[in-house]
Amino acid sequence: MAPLAKTRWRRVVTRCTGRIGSLIGLLRGELSSDVLAVLTDPKDGLFPEPRELELDCSCPDSAEVCKHVAAVLYGVAIRLDAR
């Protein structure tokens, strides 16, 4: 996954400006629905599009998705489900 483009980051910051209710809440990971909408916007949010993700491992396994990549994806899914 490539780093977020500076122009895209600036748009996210601009759109979030004034929508964060409390610094303490932000530090606790509490985000308002307005901020979450900005961050998860499919076109201008923080998350990459599926085509931007690359799954790669240096192990000798010839499978397209080796056990290491599968384990990472499983771990990410667990973290997402926990929230």
Image: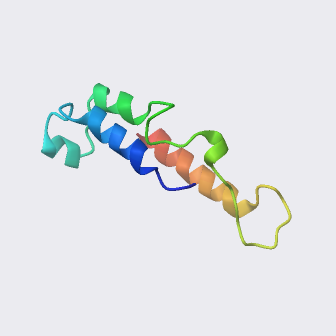
Given residues 16 and 28, the one toward you in this image is 16
Image quarter where the N terminus lies is bottom right
Horizontal and vertical percent position of residue 16: 27, 35
Picture quarter containing residue 9?
top left
Horizontal and vertical percent position of residue 75: 56, 53
Q: Residue at x 42, y 42 (%)?
A: 8
Q: Is residue 49 left or right of residue 25?
A: right
Q: Is residue 16 left or right of residue 48?
A: left
Q: Is residue 64 above or below residue 34?
A: below
Indicate how the structure is coloured in the image: rainbow
Given residues 68 and 8, the one toward you in this image is 8
Horizontal and vertical percent position of residue 69: 68, 59
- Number of marks: 0
Given residues 38 and 30, the one toward you in this image is 38
Residue located farthest toward the front when viewing the structure as drawn:
7
Residue located farthest toward the right when viewing the structure as drawn:
62
Q: Residue at x 22, y 35 (%)?
A: 17
Horizontal and vertical percent position of residue 5: 46, 50
Q: Residue at x 66, y 43 (%)?
A: 51
Q: Is residue 2 left or right of residue 33?
A: right
Image quarter where the C terminus lies is top left
Q: Is residue 78 above or below residue 44?
A: below
